[in-house]
Amino acid sequence: MIHLSALAREGVDPAVAGIAAAPVVSLDAAGLHAIVSHHDDAVQATADAALAHVTVIEALAGRTDVLPVQFGPGHTDEATLRAELDRIRPQLHTLLDRVAGHVEFVVRAAEAPAPATVGAGADQPKASVPGPGHPGSGRGPGRAYLEGRRAAVRAEAEREEALRERLGATTEPLASTAAAVRDTTGRNGPERCFLVPRPAASAFAAQAGQLTEDAGDLVVGGPWPPFTFSSLAPAPEGTS
């Protein structure tokens, strides 16, 4: 099986091992270089494998412009991989043109929020709903539980919307220095991602660091390879 980590215009072999310490090599494909590793079996999506995948991309990005590829199913052979990449050749070149010479920063909440709960401890009602005609139908513990769950979902949606608004307001001064801005959702909730020209990365990091420090509960990450801006999916409206 062949595991694809990234695409680049230069055939660079990072000085780092791939998943399960497999050598990383370059294959010509779709007018680009596919950075791959070969494996006897399909690569499982474990934490170690995901870390090795990202490490290869970061090593490559330190030497040349790179189009990161999301961790996904392997390819059975080189011919199959080349055919699949050749099918989307125009999109690949367009994406690489977009991210070439850029890095990614992300601003997000410093900590994940505590999960919403309904009730407390052993007194929390069970998720059972009385059937029609039951004396407590519409007023029993099942109804209370469902109403509590709906309230918790609404509260979480409102919290996320408020965080998105704060992210937008806090990072507004950064938008003019970025080539593109994209709102996503990560482990800690809403995030705002920035595609930044590499020469402007240091100044961007300093400004973002000051803005998040003033906010108190936001942090900035990066510079990283442009993972968020390498998707083949069309960019959402309102982004550049």
Image: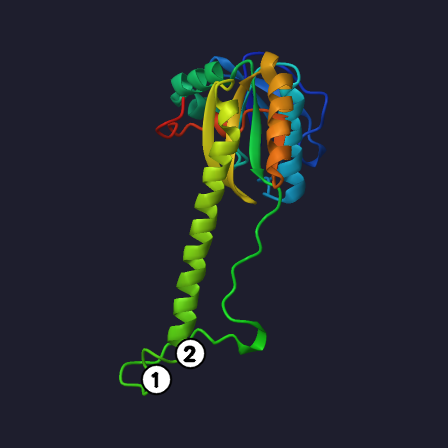
Instruction: Confirm whether residue 53 shows in the render.
Output: no
Q: Is residue 91 left or right of residue 99?
A: left
Q: Which residue is label 2 attached to?
A: 141
**Which residue is denoted by mark 1 in the rendering?**
136
Q: Is residue 14 above or below residue 228?
A: above
Visible residue check, residue 88: yes
Residue 107: give x, y in percent of width and height.
Answer: 56, 33
**In the picture, residue 235 is in which quadrant?**
top left
What kind of residue is marked 1? Gly
The answer to whether 183 is drawn above or below residue 33 in the figure is below
Placement of the C terminus among the 4 image quadrants: top left
Q: Name the amino acid, label 2.
A: Pro
Nearest to the observer: residue 38 or residue 12: 12
62 with respect to 75 (left or right): right
Q: Return the disc, 1 or 2, that comes first in the chain's sequence.
A: 1
Q: Which mark is drawn over residue 114? A: none
